[in-house]
């Protein structure tokens, strides 16, 4: 969960750069100009939350989905140095824990039925997605990078780092490895990430669920995400207009998800939805089970789960990882299973949007929280930032302020186990006693009753 800078730090920044410079600093942290200037379109409720726009001072505001890690403007030359000599720091990420190897393929999808709401010119909505799945015969199939080279260089540069300093990790996903068809049709899980975040931020969870026998689709919401790399190294950046309401953003994301589900339907029918008809993994078409679909998301992506489920009844179960809800969606009845999974200091007792949704959940529901976790603990930054903290001069105390006191590997492990337990129960009809109440093996999890 993001904590505001101490008052003396904020005063120092203001003195150092002046009001205009302070605004530039705030903008470099991913805030909208209105938020950076201290303006919001709605007054916050007494709880610190409003019906449509968050109070940017609360740690759960979507504007805080990225911690202030010395963000800097990105110079073009930084993006051309992605393929350079090995860096001083090679990042590593948690390996999957399931029984299966993992395959991966990226797809470029174009929705000609919609125009992109974030850019002028009536251009069709374009998305990049990654499909993660249980694979066989991975030999000869290279491991996908955590983020492609050009977008990865932009990601690092925006944090004041370079590919010479840091090499982003390889994932467990072997590109175009054949699907393990002996498992039969695979239940589908869709992932939506935080505001101005990238689909890569859900990789640790996605590849683990794939190793457990799911087809997991991580979705980049173009021009909402900070950087999305398309074929031919085309890089699309965040171009969301300032003052865009979170509820409007959620509607766009829900429409994105519906379109992705339609694309999966094409695959299951033997088609290829990729705009360039890129090669699909062997066995994929016979492995997509669109009759069993779940969705999970972090922060604003978690809120998008409810909005998407209201829009598309094909989504059978949903899980929100520490995301505040916006708009009218949580005030509508939902008769499908839903999990609320929060950080240690956040639950429906202090988030009115969660209380509202909870009262409208008419199917199976469960509300759990992870002790010692912070809002940002549910993203891949949980394991990544502690590794490069020293390069940015961040102390352990500063890291814990942003990412909580729970051990990063433990945080990822517990999230994986409980997400799998929920979706196994709802999509595979395998009941897990972990969801019945506290478990001695996982004392960090408590149930909000």
Image (cartoon, grey):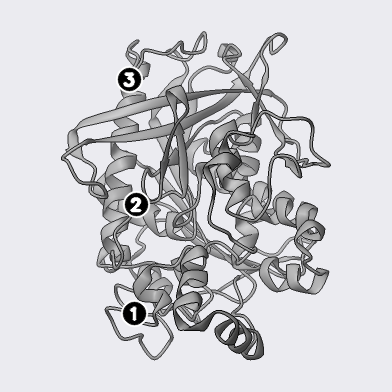
Point 77% across, 59% down: residue: 389
Mark 3 burial class by Cα count in 10 Å: few <14, some 14-19, many 20+: few
**Place of residue 345 in the rendered image (x, y in percent of width and height, measured from the top left):** 61, 77
Give the left or right position of residue 355, taking residue 70 as reference: left
Which label was assigned to residue 385? Answer: none
**Place of residue 393 in the rendered image (x, y in percent of width and height, measured from the top left):** 79, 65
Give the left or right position of residue 71, taking residue 31 as reference: right
Q: Distance from label 3 to label 1 (Cα)?
A: 39 Å
Q: Which residue is mark 3?
A: 275
**Helix, strand or loop under label 2:** loop
Q: Distance from label 2 to label 3 (Cα)?
A: 22 Å
Mark 1 burial class by Cα count in 10 Å: few <14, some 14-19, many 20+: some
Which label was assigned to residue 50? Answer: 1
Q: Is residue 398 above or below residue 410?
A: below
Q: Which residue is mark 2?
A: 239
Placement of the C terminus among the 4 image quadrants: bottom right
**Place of residue 150 in the rendered image (x, y in percent of width and height, measured from the top left):** 55, 34
Residue 363 occupies quadrant:
bottom left
Q: Distance from label 2 to label 1 (Cα)?
A: 24 Å
Q: Is residue 82 above or below residue 432?
A: above
Point 23% across, 48% down: residue: 117
Residue 264 occupies quadrant:
top left
**Helix, strand or loop under label 3:** loop
Q: Earlier in the sequence, mark 3 or mark 1?
A: 1
Q: Earlier in the sequence, mark 2 or mark 1?
A: 1
Kindly tell me whether residue 430 is visible in this rendering.
no
Q: Earlier in the sequence, mark 2 or mark 3?
A: 2
Q: Is residue 74 above or below residue 106?
A: below
């Amino acid at each position: 969960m993001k904590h505001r800078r101490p008052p003396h730090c904020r005063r120092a920044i203001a003195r150092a750069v002046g009001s205009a410079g302070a605004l530039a600093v705030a903008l470099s942290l991913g805030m909208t100009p209105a938020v950076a200037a201290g303006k919001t379109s709605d007054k916050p409720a007494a709880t610190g939350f409003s019906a449509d726009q968050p109070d940017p001072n609360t740690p759960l505001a979507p504007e805080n989905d990225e911690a202030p890690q010395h963000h800097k403007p990105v110079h073009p030359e930084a993006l051309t140095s992605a393929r350079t000599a090995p860096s001083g720091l090679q990042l590593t990420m948690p390996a999957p824990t399931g029984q299966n190897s993992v395959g991966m393929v990226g797809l470029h999808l174009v929705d000609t039925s919609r125009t992109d709401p974030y850019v002028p010119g009536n251009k069709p909505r374009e998305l990049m997605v990654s499909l993660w799945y249980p694979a066989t015969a991975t030999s000869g199939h290279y491991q996908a990078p955590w983020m492609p080279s050009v977008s990865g260089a932009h990601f690092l540069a925006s944090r004041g780092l370079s590919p010479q300093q840091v090499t982003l990790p390889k994932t467990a996903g072997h590109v175009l490895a054949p699907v393990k068809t002996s498992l039969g049709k695979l239940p589908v899980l869709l992932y939506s990430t935080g505001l101005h975040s990238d689909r890569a931020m859900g990789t640790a969870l996605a590849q683990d669920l794939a190793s457990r026998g799911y087809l997991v689709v991580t979705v980049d919401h173009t021009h909402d995400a900070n950087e999305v790399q398309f074929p031919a190294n085309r890089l699309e950046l965040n171009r969301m207009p300032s003052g865009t309401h979170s509820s409007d953003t959620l509607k766009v994301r829900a429409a994105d998800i519906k379109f992705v589900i339609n694309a999966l339907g094409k695959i299951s029918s033997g088609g290829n939805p990729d705009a360039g008809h890129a090669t699909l993994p062997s066995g994929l078409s016979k492995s997509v089970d669109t009759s069993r679909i779940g969705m999970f998301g972090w922060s604003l992506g978690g809120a998008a789960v409810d909005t998407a489920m209201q829009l598309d009844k094909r989504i059978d179960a949903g899980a929100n990882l520490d995301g505040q809800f916006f708009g009218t969606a949580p005030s509508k009845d939902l008769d499908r299973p839903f999990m609320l999974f929060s950080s240690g200091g956040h639950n429906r007792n202090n988030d009115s949007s969660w209380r509202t949704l909870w009262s409208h959940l008419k199917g199976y529901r469960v509300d759990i929280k992870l002790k010692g976790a912070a809002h940002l603990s549910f993203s891949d930054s949980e394991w990544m930032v502690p590794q490069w903290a020293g390069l940015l001069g961040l102390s352990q105390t500063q890291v814990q302020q942003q990412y909580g006191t729970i051990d990063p590997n433990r945080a990822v492990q517990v999230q994986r186990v409980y997400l799998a337990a929920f979706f196994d129960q709802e999509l595979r009809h395998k009941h897990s006693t972990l969801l019945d109440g506290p478990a001695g093996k996982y004392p960090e999890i408590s149930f909000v009753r």
